[in-house]
Amino acid sequence: MKILHTADWHLGDTFHGYDRTDEHRHFLDWLLQTVAEEHPDALLVSGDIFDHANPPAAAERQLYDFLTQVTADNAGLRVILTAGNHDSSYRLEAPAALYRRLGIEVRGVIARTAKDEPDMDTLMVVLREATDDAPAVVVLAVPFLRTEDLAQGMRQSEAVRLFFKDLVRAARKRFGPTARLVLQAHFYAAGAEVSELEHSERVVVGGQECVDATGLGHGLDYVALGHIHKAQAVAGQPTVRYAGSVLPMSFAEKNYSHGIERVVIADDGSVSVDRIAYEPPRSLKSVPEQGSGTLEDVLRELTRLPKAHGDDDGADWPYLEVRVQEPTPDPSVGAAIVKTLDGRAARLCRVLRSRPDGQPANEKTPVATLEDLQKINPVQIARDIYRNRYGEDMPDEVARLLARAKRSCEEQQATQP
Ligand SMILES: [Mn+2]
């Protein structure tokens, strides 16, 4: 049984305002060719198929064209799509009946049983029924889990672990101890390496926290993860893997390698995993390569970039960031860079200005990261503002009232269906 595992396509994504349709087309063409060469039994796409819950029509067409072609070219191929946090669970599932006719399964929403429990059976996709000679192979296709899918009264990360445990137990009960099980899921595994600087996975505020993935692979032949953009094995388990994003999603991902995972599950239970590398058509380039340079140095380096030719369609021009030192505020910096780049084969994305000592020029208005925002306590913010405005500490009575209001909001949120 051979499985190809990919994730985080983010179709419809733009990069610093530039349309990426041509890059996604390049990837999907490469994937078509790779599937034709590899003859896998199944192709798993572990979430974030689209970049937005409401993707542009061109992105939807890319997905539909790809699925039509890959199933037409490869008779018997199974494709399994699961929703990530960027996808609309309901919209992704909308063509499910059409998909099924092509051998494609999609899971966006966790269905509930009559007892109002997660319907685990609907998440089990049988790739191969058991025969006298060979065990069944089953994919547990789990979309991004939302609060309402999970058991209440415990930390969300624990509830996610419990969900997977219950699912594996239910699959074992249904398919027996010899069945080969693959889990397909989309979440943030604790300990997974992400770029702290520019965390493009964009953890949904109020959504899922980090999930401890220790031992997650136990009882599973392979775990096909999506969400983290850096391809990696998780928690020291070689068969629990993020396939990584197919394109770089931020300059912090400049040195990531891209590709898909090739998983072979033998009937004797052995599993081998290796990677098929993919080279995106556009690279990311920083000038200077490390740190920042004076305006003079930066402009000199920019003039060394290759010139664009008249008939050049720009399909392989790198995305460019320029990091320039600005000892005193100088409004002409941007214009000088743009002028120097005129006629050169590069797509300018951003100019980062810094003080020569390495401090950002705009240190007085620090930009809060999502992580910062998630850590902020609203009562503490109110206390800080009070102290700023009135020059003294907020009276305890007011602080208590605020804390009570905050608790009441949280409780209301927790009980929402
Ligand atoms: Mn994601």
Image (cartoon, rainbow, N blue to C red):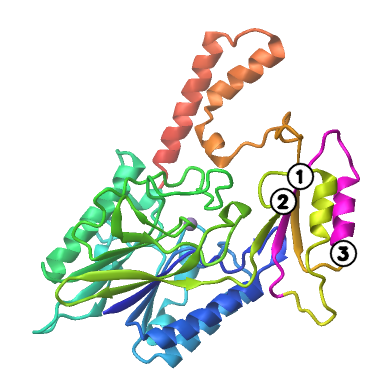
Q: Is residue 139 magenta?
A: no
Q: Quadrant of the N terminus?
A: bottom left
Q: Give the Cα separation between the discs numbered 1 and 2.
A: 6 Å
Is label 1 in a helix, a strand or a loop? loop
* Residue at x-position 59% and y-position 59%: 249
Depicted 405 relative to depicted 417: above or below: above
* Residue at x-position 59% and y-position 78%: 26
Q: Give the Cα separation between the discs numbered 2 and 3.
A: 18 Å
In the rendered structure, which amino acid carries the disc numbered 1?
Answer: Gly
- Write down the residue under mark 1: 293
Q: Position of residue 410 (x, y in %)?
A: 45, 34
In the rendered structure, which amino acid carries the disc numbered 2?
Answer: Pro
Residue 305 lies in quadrant: bottom right
- Write down the residue under mark 2: 288
Q: Position of residue 53 (x, y in %)?
A: 55, 62
* Residue at x-position 56% and y-position 65%: 247
Is label 2 in a helix, a strand or a loop? loop
- Write down the residue under mark 3: 342
* Region in magenta: 315-342
Specify few, some or many for label 1: CA neighbours under 10 Å numbering under 14, 14-19, or 20 or more.
many
In the rendered structure, which amino acid carries the disc numbered 3?
Answer: Asp
* Residue at x-position 45% and y-position 46%: 207
Of the pair 117 and 336, the residue shown nearer to us = 336
User: Do tag 1 and tag 3 residues touch (Cβ < 8 Å)?
Assistant: no
Specify few, some or many for label 2: CA neighbours under 10 Å numbering under 14, 14-19, or 20 or more.
some
Depicted 48 relative to depicted 44: above or below: above
Outermost residue on the left side: it is 132
Q: Give the Cα separation between the discs numbered 1 and 3.
A: 20 Å
Q: Position of residue 290 (x, y in %)?
A: 66, 48
